[in-house]
Amino acid sequence: MPITNHEEKCEALRQLLMQGPAQTQGKLVDALNALGHNATQSSVSRNLKELGAIKTAAGYELPIENTSDENHFAEVKDLLRAMFPAGPNLLVVDTEIGAAQRVALAFDRCNWPEIVGSIGGDDTVFVATESGVAQKNIISRIEHSARL
């Protein structure tokens, strides 16, 4: 008989993701069903969103859980390629293909006051800053944190 407890299924999914990235949701469905959970692609998709999982070039992963501002960029520094100011309030950050959402999440988790928000695509992150001075401060912080 399948296990249908939502919390237990989410915990099993979290444990699977802690073992490493999952290439597809289908593989996660198969793994959960093999563990006795009643899983479908749509339920796994909802559970991934609930866990805050992100899709990277390697597959679905749990987000980085560091508390130090600098550690967020230490985890993603190898994914950064270049930065370009785009006007006084926007910074464009180029990343490895498939890494922009993870880098955008690192920006979000840093809680730097100069950042208004960020958007991650596939290989580009847009970072909105509160001013031109804030943009320069963020560039310095990124260069210091990631040693670009």
Image (cartoon, rainbow, N blue to C red):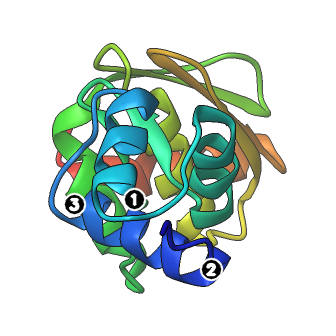
Q: Which residue is mark 3?
A: 74
- Residue 18, image quadrant: bottom left
Taking the view exactly as shown, the residue that stands out farthest to the front is 1
> Nearer the N terminus, badge 2 or badge 1?
2
- Position of residue 7 relative to residue 22, above or below, is below
Q: Residue 33: where, in percent of width, then height?
A: 39, 51
Q: Which residue is mark 1?
A: 62
Residue at disc 2, secondary structure: loop
Q: Residue at x 38, y 20 (%)?
A: 98
Please give left or right for residue 85 compared with residue 75 in the image.
right
Q: How many marks?
A: 3
**If the image is split into quadrants, where does the C terminus sit?**
top left
Q: Nearer the viewer, residue 135 or 11?
A: 11
Spatial CA distance of label 3 from label 1 is: 17 Å
- Position of residue 59 relative to residue 98, above or below, is below
Spatial CA distance of label 2 from label 1 is: 21 Å
Q: Nearer the viewer, mark 3 or mark 1?
A: 1
